[in-house]
Every structure is written in structure tokens, then in C-alpha cells.
Image: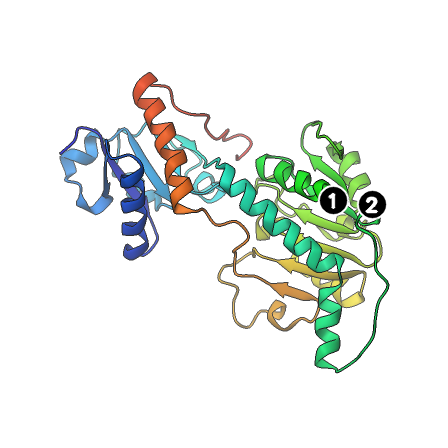
Amino acid sequence: MSTHLIPFVSRADDKEQRHWIATLSAAMPEETIVHLSDLTQAQKQDCDFAIVADPDPKDLNTLPGLKWVHSLWAGVERMVNEMPSAPFSIVRLVDENLSNTMSEAVLAWTLYLHREMPIYAKQQKERAWVQHPIVLAKERRIGVLGLGALGQASAERLVDNGFSVSGWSRTKKTLKGVDCFDGEDGLNAMLSQSDILVCLLPLTPQTEGLLNRDRLALLPADAKLINFARGPIIDDGALLQLLDEGTIAHAVLDVFMHEPLPKEHVYWQHESVTVLPHISAPSHPGSASERVAANVRQYRLTGIVPDAVDFSRGY
């Protein structure tokens, strides 16, 4: 076997793991990528690098020589939370295709809310023929929470489609066509002018519960919400209360505190909630594998680990 054995470590089912291994192997035929269980104890001792997709910490602990791992997901907060003192670096997936997929989803569901699709779906059930006034895109204020790679791509796509776009990030950023805010005061200011709020923040100790009742109440009357980030960023109880009061008109939710969303959860039947099964921007095996392959080749050439997660920030 190649001296460059790369274990694949994941909690996914065996079929999905084998599919990823085959796709990754096709992208970097010079490497030997194997299921963790196919390695001998001696081989596990020699591995300095692994490719992971929601790995079990117990499995990673069987690889004592790890210097770094490359995640196939953009979100790595579960790994950071489960292994806060990991002796290796964690590299997130940064994939242009992923940014494009997310921005496409943000545009699609923003248009869904902008053109009042939930209202017309409800009217169809009631056989009600009622036309509602059109709001021009330039008059619809969209707020994007989080201006990382996914947030920037999404904000730019919304601008390209004529919307009035603002964005918020932890630190100051500048983005053409986007009114950028930062800091606590900036967050409150942006929320107060967001007719549709799109959440694309990473989950960190600072963002968990960020959208509580006080902050959600800052949104304009009849505002709408899209959460394509992580469930724990939003206070579910506060959101449901504001939806029931009609203060928030509708929420499109792709992520939840517990996934899959329990069948008894009130979100399933709530007329002001659209439930999606975490599909806004899944990693595409082909493009993700090409990105990982490029990083691995650079590492083999230089010995330098790609930009890794800052554990103090959580991303």
C-alpha cells in the first residue's frame, strides 16, 4: 500500500462512506484513501492526516499521529464542541460550488417570501381568489447575518437581483452594493431594517441563542426569516411566540436544534413555518473532493497545513 494512507472517518452509513471514498480517490489517484476500519493498528499509528465527515471523536482518538483533518463540511462546530482540546488542526471545506449552491438557495427562498408564496399557498387551500400588491425588489430590504464566504456570495446574488441588501458581521467588512454593519449596535440597526432576515452565521458560543426574543422583536412588523445556518442560533420559543402573534409573518427553517426534526414538533404543522430537511447547501461530492485534493497536494508539496479553524472563535 502507498505510504500516503489517508483514513476516511465519518458517522455516515457505510454506503455513503464508500461513495465518498470512491469520489475522493478519483480526484487524487496518487493517494490511498481507506475506510478507517480497513487500517491495521500499526497503520493507524502512522497516519498524520485524515478526511472527515461528522467523525466520532473515539475514532479520531485511534489516530494518535494526526497533525490535521480536512472536513467535507463547511460547518465544523460539532467537532469543535466535541473535541475542544484536539491535538490536531481542523480544516473546513471552502468550496466555490458550495457558496454558489447556498446563494442559489438564499435567492430562491427570498423570492418565495418576497412574492408572498406562503400566502397564496394558504389561499389555494381555502379556494380564495385574492390578489395582493406587488412590492418591488428594490423596495424589499434583505438583511444577511454573517458575511463569510457563504454570506458574501448570497448578499452579492441578492444585490444582482435588485434587492436592497444589508449585511452584518462580527468584524467590519466592505462589500460592493451592500450596506455593511458590525458590532452590537450594528446588529440592532440591521435587524430593525430587515424585511427579510437571512441567517448564515456559524454556530459559536457567541452566536448560540443570538436571535432571542429581544433581537427578533427588533425586526419590522410582518418581517420574514430564513435560517440556513444552525438551529441553536435562534430561540425556538421566542420565534414561535412572535409567529403566533403575527409579529413575524413567516419563517423558512432548514436547520434545527435537533435533526431530523422530531415528528411531534410544532414546526411541522405551523402555517407560518416552512420546514426544509437541511438541504440549502449540501456538500457536492465531486467539487468537494477536488477542493480537498488541491489542499492535500499542496500539503504534500510544502508540508504546510491549509488555513485551519480558530478554536477560540469556533470557525
Q: Position of residue 106 (x, y in %)?
A: 63, 49
Considering only vertical position in the picture, is 138 above or below 221? above
- Residue type highlighted by circle 1: Gly
Q: Position of residue 245 (x, y in %)?
A: 80, 66
Residue holding disc 1: 143
Judging depth in this view, the residue of 233 and 72 nearest the camera is 72
- Residue 80 seen in the current view: yes
Residue holding disc 2: 193
Q: CA distance from mark 1 to mark 2?
A: 8 Å
- Which residue, as the protein is rendered here, is positioned at the far top? 302
The quarter in which the N terminus is drawn is top left
Q: Position of residue 278 (x, y in %)?
A: 52, 56
Residue at 52% from the left image edge and 49% from the top image edge: 281
- Residue type highlighted by circle 2: Gln
Considering only vertical position in the picture, is 18 above or below 34? below
In this rendering, would 183 be left or right of 85? Answer: right
- Residue 234 seen in the current view: no
Judging depth in this view, the residue of 188 and 112 nearest the camera is 112
Residue at 39% from the left image edge and 46% from the top image edge: 285
Q: Earlier in the sequence, mark 1 or mark 2?
A: 1
Considering only vertical position in the picture, is 100 above or below 275? above
Say how the picture is coloured: rainbow
